[in-house]
């Protein structure tokens, strides 16, 4: 094994150090396996209940009328998320699109959108109209209010109470921290927030941005009162196989509106050809619990390895996990580059490429990204990125298999060592 790792670029010292750290993580990995086993059974039960068979995998084109495989996949999602309905489509191009459809379908002129958890994910700023942009919700007469989190990352219930008014129609709750420094919320905490919102206003629609959170726990936000849960298929639920797509699960009346918004009023869920993508959607969903488990182990291993070398990591090495993202504060531009070179060098695709910081459109600071993915931009595959600014944090996520995530982390450590930017911890 060590010879092979040496050929891949990892020294015996780094291997040994990694094995030492792994010995301390056996309980954590067992817990992750138990969650994966539960979620695997949950997905299997949904597939069996809905009698998934070969006829579900047939390609449709054109309008996609009577697409039995597409309709059945939506029942499988609905049963897995314990919701009345689901919309799962390749016509939903990404997570931002899925969230945009859910918001614009369920907010009308004069309504107000509330984020009770501080600022939303970057790309939603233009959707909402926080940053001006054509076709924003704001342009259509939907106002926006935000209650920030308290400094310790907890919900500011007084601020939320003050923000809810007669116009408040929908609350958007982002589960994952994304590229912010706040904690990711557990499903249980999201449940508490939803209960509070409904106590203030019983008919408020609670939507959860579930990106990066699916299958990390045995429950999903829809199990604790969320009316809509939304995410991307090139993250967790696509299992690395879905080449595009998004999902919206929730109350039937709300999901129906999403379908009308996605296609056209009157058409809704009846149209939308699957273009031959259903085998990857079904099989990806089937694999998703174990893929997420592998990514989670990678995040836990990275947190513990980098923490032992003296870097600040978020979440820390012992915290419980509610998404698959790991932030590592590396303290310098050089260290970010070295880290990303390690991740890139471990990839099955484009391992020969050299990641460098660049001026990415829409970002104030230079950004560095490492990704060698089968599906472009897929962040359930092993990837790392971050803006080049203090505290010089890289956000590390994904890994279709735990062993690949492990190699990526070992190589990132190796590159930091080779550049003289860190020392291995004492055994
Ligand atoms: C990835 C992500 C999104 C959507 O991003 P896309 O790149 O459009 O898929 C939204 N919210 C969060 C928290 C995310 O992580």
Image (cartoon, helix red, strand yellow):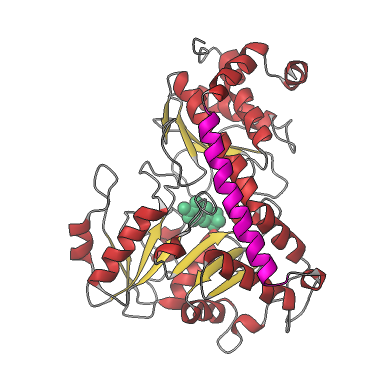
Which quadrant is the N terminus positioned in? top right
In this rendering, position of residue 293 left or right of residue 197: right
The answer to whether residue 367 is visible is no
Vertically, is 415 above or below 206? above
Q: Farthest residue toward the bottom? A: 266
Nearest the camera: 44 or 374?
44
* Residue 283 occupies quadrant: bottom right
Question: Would residue 33 be counted in the magenta stretch?
Answer: yes
In this rendering, position of residue 263 left or right of residue 179: right
Residue 131 percent coordinates (x, y): 38, 59
| Secondary structure that dominates the magenta span | helix
Vertically, is 269 above or below 423? below
Nearest the camera: 172 or 334?
172
Residue 342 percent coordinates (x, y): 63, 26
Q: How many marks?
A: 0
* Residue 70 occupies quadrant: bottom right
* Residue 73 occupies quadrant: bottom right
Residue 410 percent coordinates (x, y): 62, 23
Residue at image x 56%, y 37%?
30
The answer to whether residue 94 is visible is yes
Vertically, is 205 above or below 339? below
Q: Which residues are magenta?
A: 25-51
């Amino acid at each position: 094994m060590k010879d092979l790792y040496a050929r891949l670029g990892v020294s015996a010292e780094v291997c040994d150090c990694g094995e030492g750290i792994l010995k301390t993580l056996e309980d954590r990995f067992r817990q992750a396996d138990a969650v994966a086993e539960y979620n695997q059974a949950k997905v299997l039960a949904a597939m069996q209940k809905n009698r998934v068979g070969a006829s579900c995998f047939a390609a449709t084109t054109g309008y996609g009328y009577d697409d039995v495989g597409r309709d059945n996949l939506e029942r499988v999602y609905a049963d897995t998320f314990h919701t009345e309905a689901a919309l799962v489509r390749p016509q939903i191009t990404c997570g931002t699109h899925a969230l945009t459809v859910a918001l614009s379908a369920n907010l009308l002129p004069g309504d107000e959108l509330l984020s009770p958890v501080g600022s939303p994910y970057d790309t939603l700023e233009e959707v909402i109209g926080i940053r001006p942009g054509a076709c924003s919700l704001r342009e259509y007469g939907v106002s926006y209010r935000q209650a920030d989190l308290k400094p310790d990352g907890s919900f500011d219930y007084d601020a939320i109470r003050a923000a809810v008014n007669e116009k408040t129609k929908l609350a958007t709750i982002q589960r994952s921290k994304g590229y912010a420094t706040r904690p990711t919320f557990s499903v249980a905490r999201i449940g508490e927030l939803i209960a509070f919102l409904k106590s203030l206003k019983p008919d408020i629609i609670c939507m959860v941005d579930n990106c990066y959170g699916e299958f990390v726990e045995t429950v999903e936000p829809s199990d604790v009162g969320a009316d809509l849960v939304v995410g991307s298929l090139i993250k967790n639920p696509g299992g690395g196989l879905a080449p595009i797509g998004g999902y919206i699960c929730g109350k039937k009346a709300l999901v129906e509106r999403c379908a009308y918004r996605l296609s056209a009023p009157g058409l809704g869920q009846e149209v939308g050809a699957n273009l031959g993508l259903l085998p990857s959607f079904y099989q990806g969903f089937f694999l998703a619990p174990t893929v997420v488990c592998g990514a989670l182990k990678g995040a836990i291993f990275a947190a513990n390895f980098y923490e032992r070398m003296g870097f600040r990591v978020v979440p820390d090495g012992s915290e419980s996990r509610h998404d698959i993202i790991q932030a590592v504060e590396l303290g310098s531009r050089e260290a970010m580059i070295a880290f990303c070179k390690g991740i890139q060098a471990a990839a099955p695709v484009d391992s020969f490429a050299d990641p460098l910081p660049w001026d990415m459109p829409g970002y104030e600071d230079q950004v560095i990204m490492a990704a060698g993915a089968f599906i472009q931009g897929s962040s359930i595959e092993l990837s790392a990125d971050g803006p080049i600014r203090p505290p010089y944090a890289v956000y590390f996520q994904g890994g279709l298999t735990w062993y690949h995530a492990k190699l990526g982390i070992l190589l990132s450590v190796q590159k930091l060592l080779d550049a003289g930017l860190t020392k291995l911890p004492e055994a």
